[in-house]
Image: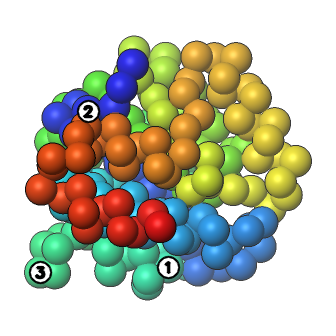
Amino acid sequence: MLLSVKRSTLLIIDLQERLAPAVHDLKRVLANVKILLAAARALEVPVLASEQYPKGLGPTLPEISSLLTPPGTPQPVVEKTHFSCLAEPGFAEFLAPAPRDQIVLAGIEAHVCVLQTALDFKAMGRDVFVVADACSSRTQANAEMAYQRMRKNDIDVVSTEMVVFEWLHQAGNPSFKSLSALIR
């Protein structure tokens, strides 16, 4: 099944100041999350973000939080202590303004919060797409095990380019030129 801008919500998981520096290949993750955020904004895909225990792990990285919403609009960030976003009381209500059945996940850590959130969304009946090159863990081995488990549970493991070009749908899309330039 292809991703659709009309059916998708992008969820950025726990890209926080004190957690991010320990993550394998953080530079790649951040570059791809920025591309996803640019595409979501250009194509009007709703964006949500989570922060795992921000008192201990700090807020979302400034370079990411500044891209979550247009300037002057409230930040769509949910604080949580549960590893799965969906286990956090109130998260479902936070998601309600964007009742879409395709959930695109990016962030850290792939084998904990991303995995548990993906499994819970799948159990809800949502189509779940985990953007592997926009996710990571402290070790590459943990991330790879998470992707294997996701695939076994019928969760699509995709790349940033796959998401962007499926959202664009065609070269004639008005955003094609600007978004394809981000990938080169």
Residue situated in front as seen by the camera: 87 or 47: 47
Q: Is residue 104 left or right of residue 155?
A: left
| Residue 54 locus on image (x, y percent) | 52, 71
Q: Nearer the viewer, mark 2 or mark 1?
A: 2
Q: What residue does disc 2 label?
A: 4
Q: Residues within 10 Å of mark 3 (few under 14, many from 20)?
A: few
What residue is pinned by disc 3?
A: 72
Q: Amino acid at mark 2?
A: Ser
Which residue is depicted at the point 32% across and 80% down? 66
Dot 2 crowding, Cα within 10 Å, few <14, some 14–19, many 20+ = some
Q: Which residue is mark 1?
A: 61
Closer to us: 151 or 160? 160
Give the number of the mark in front: 2 or 3. 2
Quarter assignment of residue 163: top left
The quadrant where residue 181 appears? bottom left
Q: Nearer the viewer, residue 178 or 111?
A: 178
| Amino acid beneath label 3 | Gly
Alpha carbon separation for disc pair 2 and 3? 27 Å
Q: What element does badge 3 sit on?
A: loop
Q: In the rendered view, would you say 93 is above or below 174?
A: above
Q: Is residue 56 visible in the rendered structure shown here? A: no
The kind of secondary structure element at disc 1 is loop
CA distance for labels 2 and 1: 28 Å
At x 15%, y 42%, the residue is 97
Q: Closer to the N terminus: mark 2 or mark 1?
A: 2
Quadrant housing the N terminus: top left
- Counting from the top left corner in percent of width and height, residue 28 is at 63, 68
Graded by Cα atoms within 10 Å as few (under 14), some (14 to 19) or many (20 or more), the crowding at tag 1 reads some
Give the left or right position of residue 19, taking residue 86 as reference: right
